[in-house]
Image (cartoon, coloured by chain):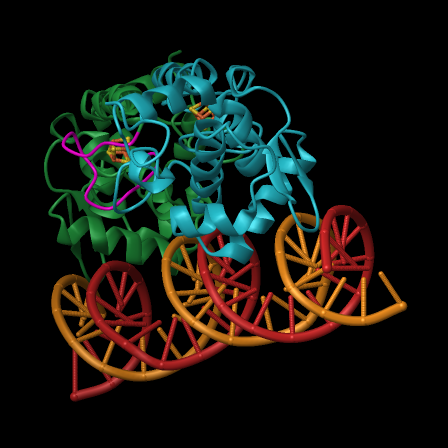
Chain colours: A green, B cyan, C orange, D red
Amino acid sequence: MLLSKSCVYGIRAALYMATRKDRDFIPIREISNDLDISFHFLTKILQQLSSADLMESFRGPNGGIRLTKDGSDVTLMEVVVAIDGIELFTECALGLPGCGVEKPCPLHDKWAVTRDSIRNMLENTTLTEMARKAREEDLRLSDDSGIRTALGLDKEDDEQE
Amino acid sequence: MLLSKSCVYGIRAALYMATRKDRDFIPIREISNDLDISFHFLTKILQQLSSADLMESFRGPNGGIRLTKDGSDVTLMEVVVAIDGIELFTECALGLPGCGVEKPCPLHDKWAVTRDSIRNMLENTTLTEMARKAREEDLRLSDDSGIRTALGLDKEDDEQE
DNA sequence: TCTATTTAAGACAATATAGTCTTATAACCT
DNA sequence: AGGTTATAAGACTATATTGTCTTAAATAGA
Ligand code: SF4
Ligand code: SF4
């Protein structure tokens, strides 16, 4: 698996938050319900993203979590690195210790190209971009319904369509 | 991590075998020593590759394991699929069940491109191609020395260089 | 036939990842 | 103050991956 489950959950939650920028702090419970992710597990993952300064949380009533910056400033790469670390993009295929251009394995040349293409994809994709796409095309972030249904958008502020 | 450790060990062993096509059956112990991989663990991995018909084994003295086909006919993709399965190339980034073009997640378009580039790289790389490169450039398959030293090539059939 | 060598198979242990639960702490409200 | 709502932190469990060890079976050769 390319990304750990923690990382995938983190991305999905970040996308969810970017999608509904209507509210400020969103309770984690609400996110975990809508995305079908274990509340406590998600809480820990969001704590990681908070300590990486991508999010900030607030306790008590009206508390929750929110993105610190605008989603257009946050790339998927930042989320991935905050959770899974940079290793995927430094080490790699055969994962020999201290590998690199000086003492490469036979796969190095080809792998480096592939690795960079993954990295470029993640670095050139922002939360806002993804969120806009999810809203416009009613794409999904969880098992069942599209994001519009999950967020109740079709009932509320988007009835005109 | 893109590939499991089992998969990486399998690839390294396959490359090793392709590099020294001098011998027929190579004892697994010899491979595990040269590549610094646990003998018993490697044995199990090679059993997986054997049941996928990429290798065949033979017991007893002069026994060991060898590639069934010429290494030029075997791609890295085949080795990866035999050990890690095809899932990496069917499911993916957000890993939602039943995902695909009909009901995609917001990442689908970009991910599909990246995913295919990984797949193409693996499908277009043969063991022989890698092995030739490893010999010519004295690249390495294990932590320490180049493949030539590991195989003793510089002492034996390559002294002229 | 007996012994040495080798893979096969499966039990077992160690570690990493994933997930659950409880208690503490902060904030808000009456 | 006291009760409610929320995150924080950490213990704990479950599962998957990785690695080790023991025993069995096959082969070769003396
Ligand atoms: S030499 Fe290159 S391809 Fe090989 S393990 Fe190191 S970074 Fe990866
Ligand atoms: S929709 Fe596409 S990118 Fe998203 S999880 Fe499914 S296959 Fe992957």
Total marks shown come to 0
Which percent across, then down, holds residue D2? 25, 85
Which percent across, then down, holds residue C21? 46, 73
Q: Nearer the viewer, residue A146 or C17?
A: C17
Which percent across, then down, holds residue B58? 70, 42
State whether residue A16 appears in this view: no
At x 58%, y 28%, the residue is: B98
Query: In the rendered image of this protein, does residue A7 appear above or below residue A146?
Result: below
Q: Is residue A99 magenta?
A: yes
Query: In the rendered image of this protein, does residue B95 appear above or below residue B69?
Result: below
Query: In the rendered image of this protein, does residue A141 appear above or below residue B101?
Result: below
User: What is the magenta segment's predominant secondary structure?
Assistant: loop
Q: Is residue B63 magenta?
A: no
Q: Quadrant of residue A119?
A: top left
Which percent across, then down, holds residue B8? 42, 39
Q: Nearer the viewer, residue B87 or A28?
A: B87
**Quadrant of the image containing the N terminus of chain B:** top left
At x 31%, y 34%, the residue is: B148
Q: Quadrant of residue A41?
A: bottom left
Q: Nearer the viewer, residue B131 or B157?
A: B157
Residue A75 appears left or right of B18: left
Q: Nearer the viewer, residue B151 or A34?
A: B151
State whether residue B12 appears in this view: yes
Magenta highlight range: A93-105
Q: Quadrant of residue A18?
A: top left
Rendered-image quarter of ligand 1: top left
**Quadrant of the image containing the C terminus of chain B:** top left
